[in-house]
Image: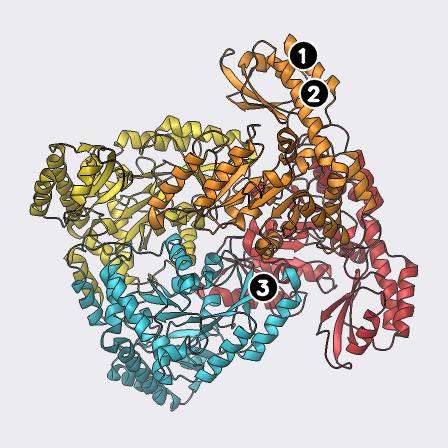
Chain colours: A red, B cyan, C orange, D yellow
Amino acid sequence: MFFASDNSGPVHPTVLEALATANGGHAMGYGNDDLTAQVADQIRDLFEAPEAAVFLVTTGTAANALALSTLVQPYDAVFCTPFGHIHLDEGNAPEFFTSGAKLSLVPGDDRMKPDALADRIAFLHGLGLGGAVPAAVSLTQMTEMGNLYALDDLRAVCAMASDHGLTVHLDGARFANACVTLGCTPAEMTWKAGVDVAVFGGTKNGLMGAEAVILFDPARARDFELRRKRGAHLLSKHRYLAAQMAAYLQDDLWLSLARRANANCARLVQGLDAIEGFERVNDALGNVAFYNVPRGLHHRLKATEAVYALWEGAETGPEDETVMLRFVCDWSLKAAQIDGFLDLAGRV
Amino acid sequence: MFFASDNSGPVHPTVLEALATANGGHAMGYGNDDLTAQVADQIRDLFEAPEAAVFLVTTGTAANALALSTLVQPYDAVFCTPFGHIHLDEGNAPEFFTSGAKLSLVPGDDRMKPDALADRIAFLHGLGLGGAVPAAVSLTQMTEMGNLYALDDLRAVCAMASDHGLTVHLDGARFANACVTLGCTPAEMTWKAGVDVAVFGGTKNGLMGAEAVILFDPARARDFELRRKRGAHLLSKHRYLAAQMAAYLQDDLWLSLARRANANCARLVQGLDAIEGFERVNDALGNVAFYNVPRGLHHRLKATEAVYALWEGAETGPEDETVMLRFVCDWSLKAAQIDGFLDLAGRV
Amino acid sequence: MFFASDNSGPVHPTVLEALATANGGHAMGYGNDDLTAQVADQIRDLFEAPEAAVFLVTTGTAANALALSTLVQPYDAVFCTPFGHIHLDEGNAPEFFTSGAKLSLVPGDDRMKPDALADRIAFLHGLGLGGAVPAAVSLTQMTEMGNLYALDDLRAVCAMASDHGLTVHLDGARFANACVTLGCTPAEMTWKAGVDVAVFGGTKNGLMGAEAVILFDPARARDFELRRKRGAHLLSKHRYLAAQMAAYLQDDLWLSLARRANANCARLVQGLDAIEGFERVNDALGNVAFYNVPRGLHHRLKATEAVYALWEGAETGPEDETVMLRFVCDWSLKAAQIDGFLDLAGRV
Amino acid sequence: MFFASDNSGPVHPTVLEALATANGGHAMGYGNDDLTAQVADQIRDLFEAPEAAVFLVTTGTAANALALSTLVQPYDAVFCTPFGHIHLDEGNAPEFFTSGAKLSLVPGDDRMKPDALADRIAFLHGLGLGGAVPAAVSLTQMTEMGNLYALDDLRAVCAMASDHGLTVHLDGARFANACVTLGCTPAEMTWKAGVDVAVFGGTKNGLMGAEAVILFDPARARDFELRRKRGAHLLSKHRYLAAQMAAYLQDDLWLSLARRANANCARLVQGLDAIEGFERVNDALGNVAFYNVPRGLHHRLKATEAVYALWEGAETGPEDETVMLRFVCDWSLKAAQIDGFLDLAGRV
């Protein structure tokens, strides 16, 4: 009954096998091994981007912050929503890796609207030399609130960015979950929509700690490579990072795991929606569901073995006050576990 | 008819005389001259802070950014209002000098409210390790919108900061204008209210380019000194910076210039308030007035020799749409100039 | 016949088993799992340092750069030898993580001498405000040139640092190899000798990618923790990092692997020393040997299947000119492989 | 008898007059005034560089650090000599403004030799991804040791830089003194020799605090402008900075002041060379002379009213041990003062 985070789930067994397979004999370090080259080719194929540069790192924060650092100067602004993981959850890593660029918030919810972006760009331009320079947009698909940009919406916001000379970064920590729900290709969700640099996340979807950064303009490759080294994110025994990603790509494991996670979430949502007191907040079309509940219900639920996150509101306060809960379903959850939780939630 | 900025006005003649006086013979560089020591003592006296460390720099942005850099770590958050000069007008200098700390906006207007600050602190703490760590508050007196914190309000927000273990920086670019209006002492507006580091601005009030940073806790002095050097803000011929500040303090020139600027603004406001189409936006108790006007009026006014800033809204658009104008009065404006402008504004 | 780097060897099978064992069910992320807590306790025991703070990261560069960032300010200097890995091989990561502190080179060879350090400290102090402020010393044990500080020498340089108010960082990428040769305890080689922060390396000694940073003063813990997050080096699925380190500590695997590596090197050195044209450059008491050879010999050797590094001198040039080669022995090399290489080296 | 620094001398009276002249009425701030535009044009003319971008700042350190920040990336290396002002005297400002680039020392004396540069470039390239990337060379004319590059030597080292794809920065804190001695034009000493960005110093030569940065490739202008703002080095009342530079250029004041300073130094050197115990160390063809003297002589000299710098060696020690003294002559010294000092030096 573990819904705290998709980071809490286990690694898929195939990944461990891939590590063992990669463990034979000696291999050149620092990404100069054959497996790393193979995986980069596979990702280029998957994204239909034969010219793209591909790099692996161990954390999503590293992937995002390094990606942004190749897109902006220190005096620039990166636009994101007030819900942006890069803004709320990365410990100032984006500011660190960009040497102090500003994250500028585009008002609205977790799905950035083109007009709101345009307003914010105009506002910063109006500030003149003292304002941070509009330079890049960072979007998250699916979003931190578990919602999805429809492809048309994604294209529209990317087009607005491009119209103003801005580049686009896509935080794809839950890239696979979005692909599954939208039924689209990686290319459609990235460069075909106007994304310049995408993060293809694996850690939240069954890997041990591996994220791919795909730079569709290979001119950015050398800068990324040197910044990754400077950020201490170039693994010496790089083959084990590549092995994880190889397993992820093999037989579309990334898709099948996301399908399982999404299906788990759908099962959960179907159940919770029907329970008195649970008011769903988001679309929950991926693997993350948010619910408003009375604090009393939260307290009773928390007293069980269920593990999840109190997302908004304090632990203490009136029992009938509304608080928001987050439930994340990873691939490894069993239907019986979900049903057990639903049973429990219906009874507390 | 120049209301564009208090940076546009001339230097007071006394300041030029002080430069000439300081120009005799040789003096040790880098602040090791007698005049620098004397000025620091005078400022300590003025602020009734015998232990304070005092440093001079040439720009308000340097003063603010260096001050903040002694208060926070790179993973920290500095709270300011959405109108903060440090956020909108300093070209990411705060992020630069703090090595990437985050400016976290406290919702509301240009005068930060204690409860809104507390909410924001709680929000960041709720984010855990990934959230920027609440560490400092930056307030501006008088504010960027030309408003004033009453002393009680200033104390209240400083107390809230202190209750949560945060330090307080005061951006005093228009420190003197605030002192004049409040009729308070520098000590009352700073350390007695709970301010840890204050900027005592001179550049907007008749100096050539000189701001004093006052660190009420002398334990911060060495860090500031080394960061000033590293920021390339330690002048070699420091005596000329000291000379400006000496002139500023002599016979309370800082107060008399601010009185003149405020009186100029009061005269302007009295006139504009009475003119059809001018709707005042701020208190204008210092030397800055904001007015909403129909764009057509702005266009007609702009066509005269009057110089001021279009603050909000685009240059082009419907003539009857409202835009916001900013008028800043410096000490050097003559009553006749203001009256001439008022006459003009009443006729266009 | 792979002597290119200890990063090129495989992971010890026990480590893969530990990953599999750790893979059961859900666990809290970001280091809040039981295994992480257990490993920290084990390291505290091993280092006889019950108060120490312990953190794991994936790369030696991250370990070093983060460690240094907790010891110095941006205007400070870190002293190292001209051979320092932090200076030559980490892509400016130390400057990045310290926000621009300077690595100041202490003249001499790869083992820093106390008097040379004292001279350099005095030189920087003599520069006044413009010079970087002496703040920390970084030593490597065993050194980048494969040499060892005797414990007395280590103590002497730490004492000189301490006498001048400097802290000491120990880069222990090959910590285990040094312990084995010196026959000393981890405590003797670190805090008992005067080290403030030590890196206990695992990656070069059979792990996949895991290094422990041990801060003997726990007051530095919170700063390190927040800087690790900001550097994007906090793994979400942290249990797999902990599992590697747990395997490393189990039954002193770290010592037995280092013993094997050192023994492999001793076998290699015994052989090469006896071969015409191979002139040993370093002590080679750990797992790294350097040899001067005529370029012609290098060319003939390189044409075989042997893999090693040309360390000094160009690939092309007169055949009789001397170049320097580096041979690194990891734990996984077999005696037969070494003997095969020796046979080959004797014949080319 | 003040030979401590050219920063200790007074400002030339013409400069104060220029400030007064600039002080009439209102002017747009932040460099948008007429005088700033005029001065930029004059400098372009002086340097025969009609396309160059010109910026003014208040300190030499700001000029150097900002210039370097437009030439290199954070993972790059800037080559300088072990005597570089940027390395020894700027409090890590170059590292700060470049976001952590490394200053890599080219062995030798204060005049960099092309071959030594080439060796160092090759060395860094040999380090691969872990080494800082060779990107720029920083030269000082005249050097920190008071010596001059002959134009041919300057061209040779610039050519070597260019051959390896590196750009060249010229620290011209004593640019005028060098021009006077070499009898060359500013263009000959900069872009015609291969310099990409030059600092045309005024502060050490009679200005209050004004340095011009000349970017011969105007494509770098916008980056510089935004970095200057971010560094808090854009003065709001910029006309007073421009006024200083206008005075400097008027009737070649910059040349006449440097001629006076150099002549003062020549007079000093002629005298000291003839005095027992004074052994000259440098060419002293500009305005700075270095002498080795027995410590006892230094102690006796110091006990007089003479002010100069002990450059190398400790204050205390054997009286017959050699220490190095630095004497700097500014334009304002009178022949009688120099003769008085010589008389004194001959008697102590």
Chain at numbered mark 3: B
Q: Is residue C27 left or right of residue D262?
A: right
User: Relative to the observer, which residue lies in front, A70 or B2?
Assistant: A70
Label 2: how many Cα within 10 Å (few below 14, some 14–19, many 20+) = some
Question: Hey, which quadrant is residue B315 in on the image?
Answer: bottom left
Residue at label 3? Answer: B133
Which residue is drawn at the image coordinates 69% and 62% (left, top)? A153
Label at residue C344: 1
The quadrant in which the C terminus of chain D is found is top left
Which residue is drawn at the image coordinates 77% and 81% (left, top)? A319
Which amino acid lies under the numbered mark 1 shown in the image of this protein? Leu
Tell me whether marks 3 and 1 sit on the same chain.
no
Q: Work out whether mark 2 precedes mark 1 in sequence or the reverse, and give the earlier one.
A: 2
User: Relative to the observer, which residue lies in front, C152 or B316?
Assistant: C152
User: Relative to the observer, which residue lies in front, B188 or A37?
Assistant: B188
Label 3: how many Cα within 10 Å (few below 14, some 14–19, many 20+) = many
